[in-house]
Every structure is written in C-alpha cells, then in structure tokens.
Image (cartoon, rainbow, N blue to C red):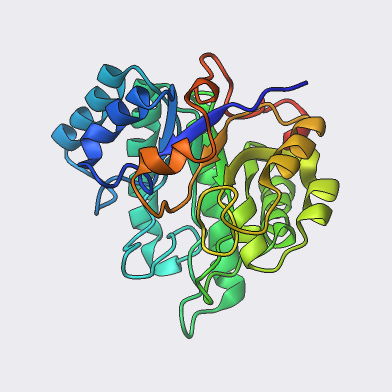
Amino acid sequence: MTSTRYAVNISILFTEIPFLQRPAAARAAGFDAIECWWPWETATPTQKEQDDFIRAVQDAGVRLIGLNFFAGDMPGGERGLVSWVERQQEFLANIPVVVELGRRSGCRAFNALYGNRVPGADVAASDAAGVRALATAATAVAEIGGVVLLEPVSGCPDYPLKTAADVFAVIDRVHRETGVQNVQFLCDLYHLAANGDDLDAVVREYGDRVGHVQIADDPGRGEPGTGRLDLAGYVRRLQDAGYRGYVALEYKTASTTEAGLDGWLPRGERGATGADNVRETNDRSTV
C-alpha cells in the first residue's frame, strides 16, 4: 500500500508567523517538504529578497517541492499572467528568476496560473498567448529537470479554467502545437469540487496524468474532515492510478496551523524524506 507523503503550503498555512519563519515552523511541526505561492509583489524581486528566501528554506532543512510563478496582484483578484496579452513581458521576465530559484533550492515543480479573462480582450488571442507562454516557461524549467503545472481555480468568475477538462484542453494544445511535453495537471481537489466538477470522473479519466495534488475540504476550504469530501479516498485512488508525489496541504485553518493539524494528521505521518513531488517527464503523465 502506498503511503501518503505530505507537504505544507506556507503561503496559506503558518500565517500566524512572518513568512521567512514558516519553513522552520513547518519543520518543527514534522514536515520535511513545503510549497508556496510567489512570495513577492513583483515578478523580479531583489537579489537580497531571493537570497533571504533560499536561506530560510535551506536553514530549516526542508525541501521546496512547489513554487508559483508570479501571478499578479493576488489579493486584488488577479490570478496569473500566462494568457494576459498585455503583460506577457512581465511573465517572461519572471521565468529566469523562477528557474534560478529552482536551481538553488532543488524545486522542480512550478505552478503557472493561467490568468483571468480581461474584459474586451480577444479570447482566441489570449489563449494563443497562453500556449506560447506555457511552452516558453516549460522549456526554460526543463533545463533544471522541472515541470510547469496548470490548475483549475475556484472563486474567480473570470478565470477560465474551472474543470479538469478545461485544464487538459490547454495542456494538450501545448503538447500538440509546440511539442513541449513538461506541462502537467495540478489536481487541486478543492478547486475542482468547488467548481462543481465530478471528482470521481476526474480521477477515473485523468488519474494517470496528474503531476501534483493539493487538498482542502469543501465547502469552506478547511482541514480534511471539515467538509463533505472523502479526500483520503480520492488520494488513495490517485495513488492507485500511479501518482507517487506529495499531497500538498493548501487549506485555511480555523485556528492555529498546529491546532488544525493535530485534529486530523498525527505528527508521525507528516514527514516524507526523499519523495519525488512530480512524475518524471518521460512517463505517462506527460502524454
């Protein structure tokens, strides 16, 4: 039986302490793997900001297994630049920064938020730009053995990728039109459920093509057990389909992070030294 290996997203958990202290807090809580959203307000943070982040991860003794590309003003409602034609240069400027952070940290999975539909924009032109941007980013991270992840997002009416089928329409177009294969599906069970996607059908149809998994319960985006989803069951089925990566905790806790964890995940089940966070790019997940 495959054991579940957990990583904690330090952009949504451990928010009770300053960001650069969160890798150490995750380690103290029993985790050896973390992921995070883009930590800065610009696409090109200063060298000192980058150095401080890498040092915090390394000093904590945790593995960074996932990092988002710059996604714009997230608190303001923006959800990525990939398909935003007028901000392509900003996204392109972010790519070498991401690659260098991956090179220094060992991170190999990079989440690229597709971007909201811009009012009045030509949808076909936006999607064509999105394909080009994803292919460019994936080609760049391939130099360090990385993959680009693409996910559905809920709670944002203007975000066009809401179901697994929406995401795979883009992934398959990238594969077909550019030949770039290292763009993979980020299976966020919460976002899929919140958008009304059929999780049973998703696991059945796409379970063997999952590059990364994130979980939170629905409704509410809280800890497992606070909502209606059989998260453990879906994770087991994804593992049965061949998924061997980390399961990232990307939920909102109702109390402190530690108190929330203690309610469902024993400390001894949190660590997973040596796990691979994504499938290799030559296996069936990149078909």
* Above or below, 3 relative to 183: above
Quarter of the figure with the C terminus = top right
At 24% from the left and 54% from the top, the residue drawn is 41
Residue 172: x and y in percent read: 73, 51
In the image, farthest residue toward the top: 274
> Looking at the image, can residue 10 be seen?
no
At 33% from the left and 55% from the top, the residue drawn is 90
Residue 243: x and y in percent read: 72, 31
Depth check: 254 or 26 in front?
A: 254
* Above or below, 156 relative to 90: below
Using residue 22 as the reference point, say whether residue 205 is left or right of it: right
* Quarter assignment of residue 173: bottom right
Quarter of the figure with the N terminus = top right
* Quarter assignment of residue 254: bottom left
**How many numbered discs, if any?**
0
Depth check: 48 or 140 in front?
A: 48
At 51% from the left and 44% from the top, the residue drawn is 136
Residue 44: x and y in percent read: 25, 46
Depth check: 194 or 150 in front?
A: 194
Using residue 119 as the reference point, say whether residue 43 is left or right of it: left
In the image, farthest residue toward the left: 48
Residue 270: x and y in percent read: 51, 26
Depth check: 83 or 71 in front?
A: 71
At 69% from the left and 40% from the top, the residue drawn is 232
Using residue 89 as the reference point, say whether residue 66 is left or right of it: right
> Looking at the image, can residue 148 be seen?
yes
